[in-house]
Amino acid sequence: NAGVTQTPKFQVLKTGQSMTLQCAQDMNHEYMSWYRQDPGMGLRLIHYSVGAGITDQGEVPNGYNVSRSTTEDFPLRLLSAAPSQTSVYFCASRHQERNTEAFFGQGTRLTVV
Amino acid sequence: GNSVTQMEGPVTLSEEAFLTINCTYTATGYPSLFWYVQYPGEGLQLLLKATKADDKGSNKGFEATYRKETTSFHLEKGSVQVSDSAVYFCALSNTGRRALTFGSGTRLQVQP
């Protein structure tokens, strides 16, 4: 059971480039979410999804797009990378049952130069 | 809305010292509360949880009690080890919310 798998683990982008961070889970969880982790700011929610075809914005959605075509996959797209998007990104999934814990991927460390 | 406040770090302790990391929350209704741990270079792992008032979550010698009257969920361990050095996050999940709300994290450094 792989859990939540994120790729890549590290990435360096130039300002203005685009890329997609991949996230896949094999636990049949309905809820998936993307967070960014910055020093002293904990984890901030970027986007989340409650099921295939349904996504919504979190607290810091600007500059990011998501889609959810299957239950398993929830990719995060940066359309035009900016230095302010340098961060560590975590994908998480959880069961739709009330108030269950989230399971996290290993993270993607992104640097935008 | 929901929010979680944790004590500022880093917390530096000697091995075998007693640990307390404070966590308070703001939420409507009856949230579930969690402590996650993040070791260097890794993702977050669930350490313990409590789903209703007065519940005590425990794991690996860590404990936290869900106190609704003080809206707190403080993390404690009687005797820390060097291997406990990590960042600890308090989080909550509330009915109708699809994602967890996290505190800012507290870095623990345990010296031999």
Image (cartoon, helix red, strand yellow):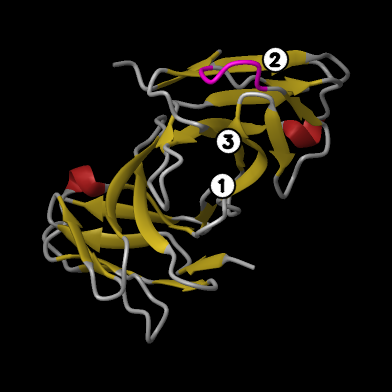
N-term mark: 3 or 2: 2
Give the labeled residue for mark 3. Answer: A33
> In the figure, residue A2 lies in which quadrant?
top left
Do marks 2 and 1 share a chain?
no
Q: Tell me which chain the residue with mark 1 is part of.
A: B
Give the labeled residue for mark 1. Answer: B98
Q: Which residues are magenta?
A: A68-72
Q: Tell me which chain the residue with mark 2 is part of.
A: A
Give the labeled residue for mark 2. Answer: A20
Residue A35 numbered mark, or none: none
Between marks 3 and 2, how big is the CA–CA gap? 15 Å
Between marks 2 and 1, how big is the CA–CA gap? 23 Å
Between marks 1 and 3, how big is the CA–CA gap? 8 Å
Q: Amino acid at mark 3?
A: Ser
Q: Is residue A103 left or right of residue B101?
A: left
Circle 1 Cα neighbour tier, 10 Å, few/some/many (<14 / 14–19 / ≥20): many
The location of residue A67, given as percent across then percent down, is 71, 22
- As displayed, is residue A85 above or below residue B97? above
- As displayed, is residue B18 above or below residue A38? below
Q: Work out which residue is located at the far bottom of the displayed protein and give it.
A: B69
Q: Amino acid at mark 2?
A: Thr
Which residue is rendered at x = 65% and y = 16% of the image?
A69
Q: Are marks 1 and 3 in contact (CB under 8 Å)?
A: yes
Q: Is residue B109 left or right of residue A108?
A: left
The location of residue A15, given as percent across then percent down, is 85, 20
